Image (tube, grey):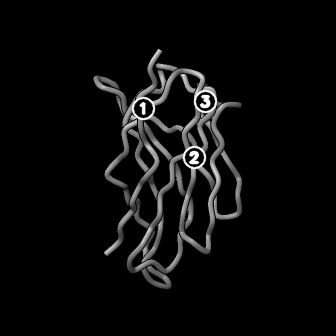
Amino acid sequence: QVQLKESGGGLVQAGGSLRLSCAASGSIFSINDMGWYRQAPGKQRELVASITRVGTTNYADSVEGRFTISRDNAKKTVYLQMNSLKPEDTASYYCNARLRQSWGGLEYDYWGQGTQVTVSS
């Protein structure tokens, strides 16, 4: 079994910062891309940022320059540093990892249960 456990969400004032963490555990052979998605009430889930195994990053236009994604492969952990937060960043944030559980096995996407980020104006 594979688990992705997020932490670091909470309530912050506009202009503040939060750091999200997501640790993968369980039967994992290798992890490819990792990323963060978010979903606000009444909206579709959207990609916030992603990072490849070798550190290539991709950001949504709405967070470019304010958020930074990073990962520690040895710890099987991905981070999201969020600065200059805005009320429109309020959402549930979900960790994603594309991984395989055995050598030669297929890659599958796994998701965390989500952590709430609320930014007050």
In the picture, measured across the screen, residue 44 lies left or right of residue 52, that is left
Residue in view at x 43 percent, y 52 percent: 7
Which quadrant, please, contains the N terminus? bottom left
Name the residue furthest top. 121
Q: Secondary structure at mark 2?
A: strand
Q: CA distance from mark 3 to mark 1?
A: 18 Å
Residue type at tag 1: Leu
Name the front one of labels 3 and 2: 2
Residue type at tag 2: Leu
Residue type at tag 3: Val
Choose the circle earlier in sequence order: 3 or 1.
1
Question: In this picture, is 116 found above or below 51?
Answer: above
Mark number, residue 11:
1
Q: Name the residue carrying label 2.
A: 80
Name the front one of labels 1 and 2: 1
Name the front one of labels 3 and 1: 1
In percent of width and height, residue 71 lies at: 62, 59
Nearer to me, 87 or 62: 87
Q: How many marks?
A: 3
Name the residue furthest bottom. 103
Choose the circle earlier in sequence order: 3 or 2.
3
In percent of width and height, residue 40 lies at: 36, 28
Q: Name the residue carrying label 3.
A: 63
